[in-house]
Image (cartoon, rainbow, N blue to C red):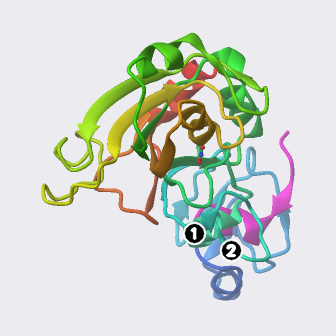
């Protein structure tokens, strides 16, 4: 026996409309539970054992939800905030299912953010012991030292003494010259030379401002930051900032493997 929930919450969570639409559907006799019309939206059901039908179609129960969001700048990686719009709000109706972001991206960072209601998997994915790769595209100003790749690969001590695990740095080129930041870069015109260096940095932790602080140690400043992959998940170019999509079965399976 699973946990009992209200019939209208169940249907809303499965994407079958708002609570008021569901109430109306109930009144019209369109909702059935275990073969009988059910007009009371507050009726408690067990989604694992009770069969719910809407307009004659069985409503399949999906307990865990996984979404990939391309987080835009200016949106906060939280479920609630007094000042800024949250990543959960960007998911509209889908966001009202107890979803939360797996880790955080800074307010000014863009890119791949996983949202789920699966607390156990989230916890495992965030553990530095699981070594889940997080790959970032960055444009940095300042002169990267010649041994930057080596220094990132050694692991380093940040300016406040925090130690971080090794990172893999790939230098793509000077700003504007590397065909817009390689295949995952956001696309920039050749003439937009900025003197910034375009890089990928892959790390396995998620300490506060970690990428920015790692570059600070090298005497550089991150001017633009975007996460392009998280474990087996890769942000596709077609998912624009602010857009999101449900993960495929293969992707969620891959995440479970990554989480160990
Ligand atoms: N590192 C940062 O500095 N910021 C982020 O948003 C993510 C990683």
Q: Earlier in the sequence, mark 2 or mark 1?
A: 1
Residue 260 visible at all: no
175 lies left or right of 18? left
The residue that appears at 41% across and 31% down in the rendered structure is: 144
The residue that appears at 39% across and 33% down in the rendered structure is: 200
Q: Secondary structure at mark 1?
A: loop
In the image, residue 58 lies at what x, y percent? 56, 57
Which circle marks residue 74 in the picture? 1
Q: Which residues are magenta?
A: 1-16
Residue 71 visible at all: yes
Reading the image, the residue beneath label 2 is 84
Local packing at callout 2 (Cα closer than 10 Å; few below 14, some 14-19, many 20+) is few
Most foreground residue, 91 or 218: 218
Looking at the image, is 45 positioned above or below residue 137? Answer: below
Most foreground residue, 94 or 24: 94
The residue that appears at 23% across and 40% down in the rendered structure is: 183
73 lies left or right of 83? left
């Amino acid at each position: 026996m699973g946990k009992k929930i209200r019939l209208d919450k169940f249907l809303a969570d499965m994407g079958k409309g708002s609570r008021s639409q569901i109430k109306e559907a109930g009144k019209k006799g369109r909702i059935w539970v275990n073969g009988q019309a059910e007009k009371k939206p507050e009726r408690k059901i067990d989604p694992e054992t009770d069969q719910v039908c809407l307009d004659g179609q069985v409503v399949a129960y999906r307990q865990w939800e996984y979404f990939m969001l391309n987080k835009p700048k200016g949106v906060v990686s939280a479920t609630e905030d007094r000042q800024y719009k949250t990543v959960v709000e960007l998911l509209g109706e889908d966001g009202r299912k107890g979803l939360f972001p797996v880790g955080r991206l800074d307010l000014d960072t863009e890119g791949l953010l996983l949202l789920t209601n699966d607390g156990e998997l989230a916890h495992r994915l965030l553990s530095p012991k699981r070594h889940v790769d997080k790959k970032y595209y960055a444009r940095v100003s300042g002169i990267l030292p010649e041994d930057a790749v080596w220094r990132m690969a050694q692991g380093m001590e940040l300016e406040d003494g925090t130690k971080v695990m090794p990172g893999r740095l790939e230098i793509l080129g000077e700003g504007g010259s590397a065909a817009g930041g390689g295949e995952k870069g956001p696309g920039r015109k050749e003439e937009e030379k900025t003197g910034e260096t375009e890089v990928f940095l892959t790390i396995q932790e998620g300490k506060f401002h970690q990428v920015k602080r790692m570059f600070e140690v090298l005497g550089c400043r991150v001017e633009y930051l975007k996460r392009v992959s998280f474990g087996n998940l890769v942000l596709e170019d077609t998912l624009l900032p602010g857009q999101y999509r449900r993960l495929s079965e293969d992707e969620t399976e891959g995440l479970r493997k990554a989480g160990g």
